Image (spheres, rainbow, N blue to C red):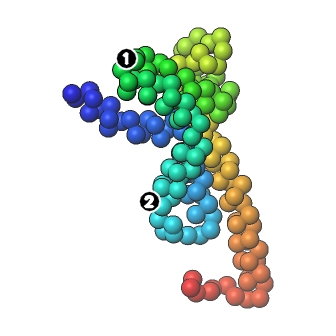
Amino acid sequence: MLLALTVLAVAPAILLMCTSFTKIVVVLSLTRNALGLQGVPPNQVLAGLALFLSLFVMSGVLTQINDTAVQPYLANDMSFAQAFDVGKVPLQKFMVANTRPEELALMLKVSNEPAPATPNDVSLTTLIPAFILSELRSAFIIGFVIFVPFLVIDMVVSAGLMSVGMMMLPPV
């Protein structure tokens, strides 16, 4: 019973980390900061938007998992362990396709695991951290690319205002 409650408590975080949610929420947050908006849209709106965009991105993978693992398990055609093994394959393929080889090599080195024959043979305990690092890296790169134009605009406006002697402007 305690194990089931623990799994239920941790499952949402694991599912969010194994999808594109992390990348989307980081990019949206950096975009909000680039626009100079502290609380608009609220964090709940950003999280909701990121969640639904993640569902859109992951719809093919989630459909495969549902068709091959969840529905047969609910119909008592396979055990939980079999359903997990079958269901992790589409998610693992998605994560391998979206993980940079450098992060995967780093995680393999840190975990002291031997190099697998193919990237699909990497264990989930190594693949998930490599995937998260890849998603964070690409999210910060995208956020930086979005942020830089706003920074340049701020600098041009600031230089223009300084040139006409308007050093102190009210914030409103």
- Report the number of discs: 2
The reply to whether residue 37 is visible in this rendering is yes
Viewer-side residue, 149 vs 97: 97
The reply to whether residue 103 is visible in this rendering is no
Report the residue marked by disc 1.
Answer: 79
Viewer-side residue, 77 vs 123: 77
Q: Residue 169 appears at what percent x and percent y?
A: 62, 86
Q: Residue at x 55, y 13 (%)?
A: 113
- The amino acid sitting under disc 1 is Ser
Report the residue marked by disc 2.
Answer: 44
**Which secondary structure, mark 1?**
loop
Q: Residue at x 68, y 60 (%)?
A: 147
Q: Earlier in the sequence, mark 1 or mark 2?
A: 2
Q: Residues within 10 Å of mark 2 (few under 14, many from 20)?
A: few
* Residue 103 appears left or right of 77: right
Q: Residue at x 49, y 38 (%)?
A: 17
- The amino acid sitting under disc 2 is Gln
